[in-house]
Image: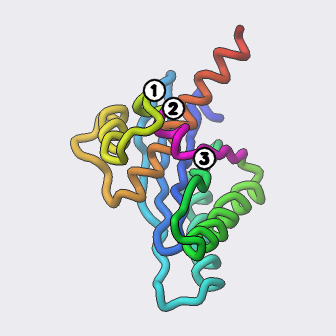
Amino acid sequence: MKNNSVKILGLDPGTAITGWGLIEEKKGEPVLKAYGCIETPKTHSDVERLREIARDLRHILKTYQPDEVAVEDLFFFKNLKTAIKVAQARGVLLLIPTENRIPVFEYTPLQIKQALTGYGRAEKKQVQIMVQNILKLKKIPQPDDAADALAVALCRQQSRKIELLNDLG
């Protein structure tokens, strides 16, 4: 952690689209560094898609060198087949940072909503507006997957503050 700052990479798992967002905490305040999505073609096999996610995540880690990674946890899915595919992508997102000795933290959608809005059942749009406000942006980051990933990173940043306070107390 350089110069009293911490870079946090947030990840919103998906097989077709994995959102990612990088913030840097400087003097306790989050600053947007970069965001985007890892997209995989539907025409590719599951194995090829997971390989692409792993390759792109390795590139993001090498390029931005985050100190921590935060990944959204699976919470509830109506479609079991979709849940299994997302869980496989999540496995890649958990494995690659640990191979690089980067600590990984997991947060449920409820925890993310609670951290950003103070209400665990907040609507997706409310969370995205809070991402925009907290990071002092002119507009909500697009696509939604990237905004969701930034929400995960901001949740980690809030959790770090609480952990530090608990360590002091």
- Badge 2 density bin: few <14, some 14–19, many ≥20, Cα 10 Å: some
Q: How far apart are marks 2 and 3 (CA)?
A: 14 Å
Which tag, 2 or 3, sits closer to the chain's start?
Answer: 2
- The kind of secondary structure element at disc 1 is strand
Residue 159 covered by magenta stretch: no
Measuring from the top left, give residue 83's x and y in whole percent: 59, 68
Q: Nearer the viewer, residue 73 or 25?
A: 73
Q: Name the residue at the left extreme.
A: 138
Label 1: how many Cα within 10 Å (few below 14, some 14–19, many 20+): few
Residue 58 placed where, x, y %?
Answer: 63, 65
Position of 69 relative to 120 (above/below): below
Residue that numbered label 1 is attached to: 29
Q: How crowded is mark 3: few (under 14 residues within 10 Å), some or many (20 or more)?
A: many
In the drawing, does residue 63 fall left or right of residue 17? right
Magenta stretch?
Answer: 103-114
Which residue is the site of mark 2?
A: 25
Disc 2 element: strand
User: Was residue 108 drawn as part of the magenta stretch in this picture?
Assistant: yes
Residue type, numbered disc 3: Ala
Q: In this view, does 160 lie above or below 82?
A: above
| SS of the residue under disc 3 | strand
Q: As rendered, which of 8 and 48 lies closer to the eye?
A: 48
The residue drawn where x is 54% and y is 29% is: 158
Between tags 1 and 3, which lies in front? 3
Q: Look at the picture and state if 38 lies above or below 159.
A: below
Discs 2/3, front: 3
